Image (spheres, grey):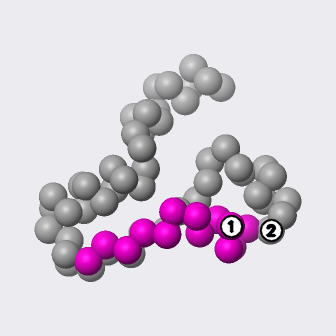
Amino acid sequence: MENIARQVPLSSINRPDWDREILTKIGFTTINIIPDIWQQVWSDEEKLNYASTPMFLIKAIK
């Protein structure tokens, strides 16, 4: 599984920082990011199961 993860293009990218940079470059003027949205929306079970791939939220307006 680790070998597969190394081949996925965004595996080594620090997200959502990468997303903010790209969205700014392509002209989005308002970018709101909630990096820990998973804490608010996941059940305790989901938090245990998916802790290694936490969910974040991005709202961008052009």
Placement of 61 over or under 45, stated as above or below: below
Instruction: Name the residue located 58 percent from the left edge and 64 percent from the top edge.
Output: 36
Q: Is residue 62 magenta?
A: no
Q: What's the amino acid at mark 1?
A: Gln
How many other residues sit within 10 Å of disc 2, few (<14), some (14-19) or many (≥20)?
A: few
Residue 58 in the image: state x and y as whole percent. Answer: 42, 69
60 on left or right of 2:
left
Residue to which mark 1 is pinned: 39
Name the element at disc 1: helix
Residue to which mark 2 is pinned: 43
Q: What's the amino acid at mark 2?
A: Ser
Residue 13 in the image: state x and y as whole percent. Answer: 40, 39
- Residue segment shown in magenta: 30-42
Instruction: Name the residue located 62 percent from the left edge and 48 percent from the top edge.
Output: 53
Quadrant where the image shows the C terminus = bottom left
Marks 2/1: CA distance?
8 Å
Instruction: Name the residue located 33 percent from the left edge and 50 percent from the top edge.
Output: 18
